[in-house]
Amino acid sequence: MPPHTVRALQQKKTMISSPSGGFFDTFGISRKLLWYNWGMKHEDLADRKRYSYWTPVTLRYGDTDSLGHINNAVFTTLFESGRAALLFDREGAIAGAGKTFVIVNLNVNFTGEMHYPGTVEVGTAVDSFGNSSVKLVQGLFKDGICCATSHSTIVLIDESTRRPISIPQDIRKLIASAAGDEDLLSTKCGSKE
């Protein structure tokens, strides 16, 4: 890792630790490097208790790479499956006609390998609501072990203008209720203060 990146990470004041060492030990990088993740430690997101909305996803043989483990690009698709399950019900998109959520930010932290075959459990929780956005946190668990965590921001847009629009209260309630995070609705715009 370039020295300027290490310095930038060290200025952030939020602790990260990789449970198995992995990348950090392999390349001699201190496991106490600091990084920014919306003020949340990775350990908080690696705890299954953080999530109340779960999506099981069956791994496919085609998800593997030449090293025999699940390709890192597939992790983002697994997180997408969790987001889609939260935002769509049997009747379609919970945003309603003429509106849709688009992803504007995705950060993934890889903490372990996954291997075929098996099922991955995608835990999803709402971190906060903005005027037109929702911040989600997610964890990928295989055989009870957290293999990755993510932070994402999705924005509600008008499909015809392609511009952000305010999230109506009924949609906020649907998302928060599905994710088991109804307490977020009691704060201003649903954002954590």
Image: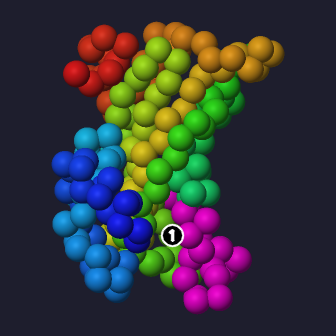
193 is higher (above) or lower (below) than 53: above
Q: Residue at x 64, y 33 (%)?
A: 102
Q: Amino acid at mark 1?
A: Thr
Crowding around mark 1 (Cα neighbors within 10 Å: few <14, some 14 to 19, many 20+) is some
Indicate yes or no whether the magenta region holds residue 53.
Answer: yes
163 is higher (above) or lower (below) than 140: above
Residue 60: x %, y % from top left: 65, 74
**Magenta segment boundaries in residue numbering:** 52-75
Query: The residue tagged with tag 1: helix, strand or loop?
Result: strand
Q: How many marks?
A: 1
Which quarter of the figure has residue 65? Answer: bottom right
The N terminus sits in image quarter: bottom left
Residue 88: x %, y % from top left: 61, 34
77 or 105, which is in the foreground?
A: 105
Q: Residue furthest bottom?
A: 67
155 is higher (above) or lower (below) than 25: above
Which quarter of the figure has residue 99? Answer: top right
Indicate yes or no whether the magenta region holds residue 187.
Answer: no
The C terminus sits in image quarter: top left
- Residue carrying label 1: 119
